[in-house]
Amino acid sequence: MFELDVATRHIKSRRRQTLFSVIAVSLAVGIIIIFMSMMGGYTSILIDSTTENQAHITIMPKEDEDYIHLYHGLENHIYDLEGVEGVSSYFQGEAALQYKHNAEGVLLYGINPEDENRVVNRDKYMLAGEFTSIENPGSRIVLGYKLAKNLDVGMGDSVTAQIPGAEPIDFTITGIFQTGTPLDETMAFVNIERLQDLYRSGDVITGMGIRLSDPYASEDLANGIDRETGYDAISWMEQNAEILTLLETSEGMVYFFYIIIFGISGFGVANVLIMIVMEKMGEIGMLMAMGTSRRSIMLIFLLEAAILGMMGVAVGCILGYAASAAIASIVIPVPPEMYFGMDHLPIVIEFKNFISASVFAMVINIIAGVFPARRASKMDPVEAIYSV
Amino acid sequence: MSEKYIIQIKNLTKIFGDGVEIKALDDVGLNIEQGEFMAIMGPSGSGKSTLLNQIGILDTPTSGTILLDGVDVTKMSDKQRSVTRNKQLGFIFQYHHLLPDFNALENVMMPLLINGVKRSEARKTASKMLEEVGLGDRMKHRPNQLSGGQNQRVAIARALVNKPSIVIGDEPTGNLDSKASDNIYELLRRLNREHNQTFILVTHDKHMAAKTDRTIQLVDGKICEDSRNGNGD
């Protein structure tokens, strides 16, 4: 294939231009791989922390009802559904917690800690004490570390809960948790039966959390529960629709930038090729005189674009990998509650990112090569030969 | 010499320009025999190169026909023209037009590779051709490492390597001093005699034209003189 010979010689004979266009392509590929790794890391940490920290499906009372009655049957039914790993019924109420002169409004969750742990692993987030300490109906409470700080309380201290329509009642702090989310400031857990008693609600719940083996199956399953039971089942995706839409929008925006970055590198390649075509006019004319078809002339310059692209892609992938790995290893001192409990930039280095950045770059490069290649192939051989 | 004409040109007209029209060739008729060694002469702008480019099917006429070996090349598709140029025609220009990034051997191999000949075979044929033009010891040299005369020899080897039936040269010695010119002329003449290929050379050099078999004079796109020089076999 003499076309490849001619293409490689052209590139070899123009080292400086080759170097610059390879730098342009490799920078574009490298930057995009870093972007993709960061976006991927950001997305996965956001989704992981969302699916870790909340129930995959939450069942709420029917419309116009405040409670789910006779929930034990529903609990058993849900447990039997495929893919369900845990079910936790809860009774939720608003209350004010008071310690000396400090008072804070909280969301009190009455739960069975064993069930709750199967839906969201609360044990994992305990700073002090045991989550299971509220297993038995008693005046024990587990609260968020920020809430504890705001109230200026510690383990073993006694806080007074003010519940609308009930006598103030004292709870002993037997656990403090930290999730790295705003819940640390507003959430407290007590035993479910204890809370039901205080609210004099009888054996009812205000909601039920479900954990699935596959978080992405939650949408379908929630719809199924919805239809089957008449209760309002909400998937985590529905609950976090804003975050997911935001992620999608930002992904779209990022793709827009990718196109711009690749476009710029494409112009670099096109520029080098146009210069080669101008400089090699006589040579192109002579190749035509020797019987080279217009298709072969076109192929020569497309091959040059492809070779420049491949060199850039190879260097860019190495660059992108090295830079992503370097960024991933940097520890950043940020408050954990600001960034979902992260202490370093989230980077996910994925093979598919390298593939898509490379394919994208190659396609843009070849497109960039089309104009100069067409120009070369359309030359009038007589004009080309006598241009020298 | 065979009576069969390898080139038959009938009523060939070429008009250039949009707006102001210039008749570069005006109803030219010309028959050339196999193995002829001929010169085309004429003042600047008389249409010499235009005629040559028509015979070399690098350009298309406004009207008229050109038969190469009995086939009308003016009706050929772009692809057929490329194939015909590769197999039947060899070109030598005033400027050698060697590919500067390739050495002498690779340059001579190029028409064979374009024709799809295997690399090893192309190398063998090309080196034989280079030896024939007296450059057996310069095969690995690039054009910038060779003299003007040597480069022109490489260009001749390249023009002849595919064994074309017609070789056209547009002032092949125009860039060379008289000694180198003579050498090139002798080389072309020898190759013409050895291979019985048809040579058509455009030249300004009367001395050189006189040594060919036949000279045609072009003036304003018309053949005004067609003479045999008595140098033939």
Image (cartoon, helix red, strand yellow):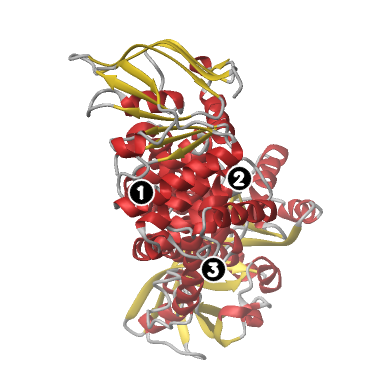
CA distance separating discs 2 and 3: 52 Å
Which callout, 2 or 1, points at the residue further toward the start of the chain?
Answer: 2
Position in image of residue A83 (x %, y %): 76, 55
- Residue A309 located left or right of residue B39: right
Q: Pinpoint the chain carrying mark 2.
A: B
- Amino acid marked by disc 1: Ser
Callout 3 secondary element:
loop
Foreground of the two, A327 or B211: B211
Q: Pinpoint the chain carrying mark 3.
A: A
Q: Which residue is mark 1?
A: B181
Callout 1 secondary element:
helix
- Residue B213 located left or right of residue B136: left
- Residue A347 located left or right of residue B196: left
Please state which of the two labelled residues, at mark 3 or mark 1, is closer to the viewer.
1
- Amino acid marked by disc 2: Leu
- Amino acid marked by disc 3: Val
Position in image of residue B100 (x %, y %): 41, 56
Foreground of the two, A297 or A340: A297
Task: Judge if badges 2 and 3 mark residues of a common chain.
Answer: no
Position in image of residue A333 (x %, y %): 38, 83
- Residue A332 located left or right of residue A194: left
Q: Residue at x 51, y 25 (%)?
A: B78
Mark carried by residue A348: 3
Mark carried by residue B112: 2
Asked if the residue at tag 3 contacts the one at tag 2, i.e. Cβ–Cβ closer than 8 Å, the answer is: no
Callout 2 secondary element:
helix
**Screen quadrant of the N terminus of chain B:** top right
Q: Residues within 10 Å of mark 3 (few under 14, many from 20)?
A: many
Q: Residues within 10 Å of mark 1 (few under 14, many from 20)?
A: some
